[in-house]
Image (cartoon, grey):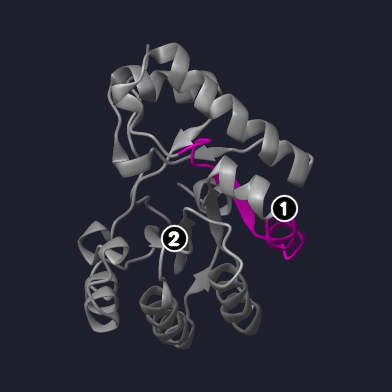
């Protein structure tokens, strides 16, 4: 069996980067993120929590309608390594049902909450047809609200063609993240980067 791994960066020939957003959809911050990408003419991947999709189905639908990718971030956001494999599988299944309801198709990617994985979880995700996605800019720690400048600086330094970047549009005040993303999107597009979904990025791997 091929050993599975978490994808944070891939080798590509074009200047492309994948912005990803965890823990939404959120009624305040997700629309702000959508506006940034609408203006930039780019797309992102939203790793949504099932419970939040149930709470805000209209926003989840808007994300899909605007051409962004919706991916699996579990149903209740547990650390999957602390569950039985059966419980972990149920977390993925319930979230997957909601993704299919919104998009009409299956999620292609999965991000484990808290990056909590082991070989069993990676294998479980692969069995479900998911690629397990990490991030190149973990040092930005936007989830801790360390300040817009910190988020920008530690994301900027992680960017190269093929990078996957993590941000959060849900669970708490995400205004720092939104401002950081606004700055980064302007910088990167000015520098000739295209903003693509995780699935689009993986299709470009040489």
Height in image: 28 above or below 13? below
**What is the magenta range?**
57-76
**Circle on res. 130:** none
Q: Is residue 129 visible?
A: no
Left or right of residue 48: residue 187:
left
For the residues labelled 2 and 1, say whether their Cβ atoms are less than 8 Å apart: no
Q: Is residue 68 magenta?
A: yes
Left or right of residue 64: residue 182:
left
Which residue is denoted by mark 1 in the rendering?
A: 57
Name which quarter of the figure residue 28 lies in: bottom right
Which residue is denoted by mark 2 in the rendering?
A: 13
Total label count?
2
Residue drawn 40% across and 19% down?
Answer: 123
Q: Nearer the viewer, residue 13 or 197?
A: 197
Name which quarter of the figure residue 15 lies in: bottom left
Q: CA gap, disc 2 to disc 1?
A: 37 Å
Label 1: few (<14), some or many (≥20) within 10 Å? some
> Secondary structure under badge 2?
loop
Left or right of residue 82: residue 42:
right
Front disc: 2 or 1:
1
Residue drawn 53% across and 69% down?
Answer: 195
Height in image: 54 above or below 76? below
**Residue 21 x/y as whole percent:** 47, 59
């Amino acid at each position: 069996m091929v050993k599975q791994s978490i994808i944070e960066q891939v080798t590509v020939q074009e200047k492309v980067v994948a912005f990803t957003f965890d823990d939404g959809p959120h009624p305040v911050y997700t629309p702000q993120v959508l506006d940034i990408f609408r203006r930039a003419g780019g797309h992102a991947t939203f790793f949504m929590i099932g419970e939040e999709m149930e709470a805000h189905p209209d926003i989840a639908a808007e994300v899909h309608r605007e051409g962004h990718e919706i991916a699996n971030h579990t149903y209740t956001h547990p650390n999957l390594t602390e569950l039985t494999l059966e419980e972990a599988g149920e977390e993925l299944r319930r979230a997957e049902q909601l993704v299919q309801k919104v998009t009409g198709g299956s999620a292609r990617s999965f991000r484990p909450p808290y990056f909590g994985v082991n070989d069993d979880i990676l294998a479980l995700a692969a069995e479900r047809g998911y690629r397990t996605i990490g991030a190149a800019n973990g040092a930005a720690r936007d989830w801790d609200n360390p300040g817009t400048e910190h988020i920008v600086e530690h994301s900027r330094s992680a960017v190269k063609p093929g990078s996957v970047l993590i941000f959060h549009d849900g669970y708490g005040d995400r205004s720092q993240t939104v401002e950081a993303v606004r700055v980064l999107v302007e910088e990167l597009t000015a520098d000739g980067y295209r903003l693509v979904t995780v699935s689009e990025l993986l299709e470009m791997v040489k």
